[in-house]
Image (cartoon, rainbow, N blue to C red):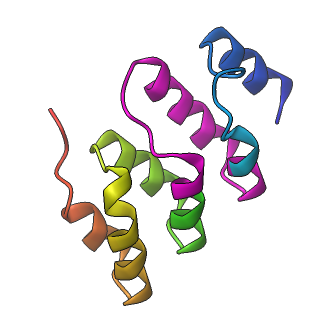
């Protein structure tokens, strides 16, 4: 990760308190996605575990969709169903339609 990203995560108090960072980077989540997830987490919003984010990434969801799902309040209990939908050929758009924007 770049120094700027590490500094920002430290400023958000997410660097030391977020053990899933390494797992997410190993799954090739972008620094931008990790930083946005860190911002959401710092704001007190529930963020999927690194393991779940990696599973969804491996299932073929792009970083932008992962962040959008977190913003929409997707829970850990939804991850198995999302992976199954993706394996059945559901598009990212179809998956996002299942979770309305919060707000």
Q: Position of residue 22 (x, y in %)?
A: 76, 43
Examine the residues drawn in magenta and state their main secondary structure. helix
Query: As displayed, is residue 46 above or below residue 63?
Result: above
Q: Position of residue 77 (x, y in %)?
A: 33, 57
Q: Quadrant of the N terminus?
A: top right
Q: Nearer the viewer, residue 32 or 41?
A: 41
Query: As displayed, is residue 85 above or below residue 12?
Result: below
Residue at 27% x, 45% y: name it.
Answer: 72
| Magenta residues, start to end | 24-53
Reply yes or no: does residue 9 show up in magenta: no
Reply yes or no: does residue 25 show up in magenta: yes
Residue at 38% x, 88% y: name it.
Answer: 89
Query: As displayed, is residue 49 above or below residue 77?
Result: above
Residue at 60% x, 59% y: name it.
Answer: 54
Q: In the visual, does 8 lie left or right of 65?
A: right
Give the quarter of the image for residue 15.
top right
Q: Quadrant of the C terminus?
A: top left
């Amino acid at each position: 990760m770049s120094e700027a990203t590490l500094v920002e995560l430290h400023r958000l108090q997410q660097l030391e308190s977020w053990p899933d960072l390494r797992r997410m980077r190993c799954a090739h989540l972008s620094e931008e996605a990790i930083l946005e997830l860190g911002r959401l987490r710092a704001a007190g919003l529930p963020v999927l575990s690194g393991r779940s984010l990696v599973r969804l990434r491996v299932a073929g969801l792009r970083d932008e969709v992962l962040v959008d799902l977190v913003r929409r309040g997707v829970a850990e209990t939804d991850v198995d169903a999302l992976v199954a939908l993706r394996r059945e050929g559901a598009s990212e758009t179809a998956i996002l339609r299942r979770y309305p924007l919060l707000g």
